[in-house]
Image: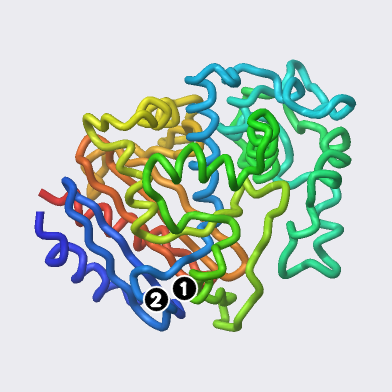
Amino acid sequence: MQLRPRIEPVLERSAVPHTGLVVGALAYGDVAVWHRGPVPDGPRSIFEIGSITKTFTATLLADMAHEGLVALDDPVNRHLPAGVCVPSRGRDITLEDLASHRSGLPSVPRGLLRRALWPDRRNPYARWDAARLEAAVPRSRPRREPGRKFAYSNYGVGLLGYVLARRAATTYEDLVRTRICGPLGLVDTWIETPEADRRRVAVGHDRRGREVPHWHLAALAGAGGLRSTAADLLAFMRLHEPGAGHPLAAAAAETRRTRIRRGRASIGLGWVSLPPRARLRRRVFLHEGGTGGFRSFAGFAPDAGVAAVVLANQARPVGRLGLKVLAALLRE
């Protein structure tokens, strides 16, 4: 497939006012990446990907479950330190509940918003180390019985990343690097980019274009702490291509399996899927992300073997542009 004739008109028509933008497209093994505006290393620039991190956390869960290190229906409390327990409401919250946003837990742990107002309002998660998270767990009660309703929870997926790292006796970053990045050859996906590559990390900007600090999610890194490139994210989504033979392909397929529906959307582990519609002629899976100075989109159509990534270093949405790129790839 000729990617540039399909994607470049979309970029020309979508005059999104971002400080810097990188767009990547994959179709039937062909890859192309574009960049617009001031970014530090063109298409190789590194961005905070925010909640797209959750799809990595979900893949870790599925892979560790496949290996028998955990089970999807394990209660979260089985993997927390002695004396630290998530309150129950009806039944225990499971690891699968956390990954599919069915835990009933609030969006953020109790106390985070209050503490973020000062002095961390521009980097709200930075002080949430393991000790603070463990202290908040017993006080952050579920709002409803697990499994009944979809309710997006940064806290829930952050807690999942934390307990998976504890189960593996390592850090969340090392777990991602060892179980996903190494096997897939993802060289630019980190929480803390190595010193030699930090010049390639884009500077974030708020909606008005003012520079803002990078976010650090500490013990909640599994909810949104990764940085990456368009090339790495496209390689990650190749796990979902038809006939993918990689050892992680089984875990990737597990993340796509529907756990709950919300309107026309279906929720798996990490990924949200949409049914075929006018422009998107195949079922697509996607996730968006955002931190204080970045926005991101990752989406793919597994039956068609296409994927798209949009990364911006300004806090303005990019989801609509991402869907347009996917639609262009799916056009017959």
Cβ–Cβ under 8 Å for marks 1 and 2:
yes
Residue at horizontal 31 percent and vertical 36 percent from the top = 240
- Amino acid residing under circle 1: Arg
Classify mark 2: residues with Cα within 10 Å, few (<14), some (14-19) or many (20+): few
- Amino acid residing under circle 2: Asp
Q: Residue 31, labelled with which disc?
A: none
**Residue 145 seen in the current view:** no
Q: Nearer the viewer, residue 13 or 305?
A: 305
Indicate left or right for 211 with 128 as reference.
Answer: left
Q: Between marks 1 and 2, how big is the CA–CA gap?
A: 5 Å
Indicate left or right for 242 with 183 as reference.
Answer: left
**Residue 140 seen in the current view:** yes
Q: Nearer the viewer, residue 326 or 293?
A: 293
Q: Is residue 270 above or below residue 45?
A: above
Residue 108 image offset from top left, x and y in percent: 74, 47
Mark 2, residue position:
41
**SS under mark 1:** helix
Residue at horizontal 82 percent and vertical 29 percent from the top = 81
Residue at horizontal 58 percent and vertical 70 percent from the top = 293
Q: Quadrant of residue 230?
A: bottom left
Q: Is residue 269 above or below residue 317?
A: above
Q: Nearer the viewer, residue 203 or 263?
A: 203
Q: Does label 1 or label 2 sit earlier along the sequence?
A: 2
Mark 1, residue position:
200
| Total residue callouts | 2
Indicate left or right for 61 with 299 as reference.
Answer: right
Q: Is residue 152 above or below residue 32?
A: above
Residue at horizontal 87 percent and vertical 33 percent from the top = 138
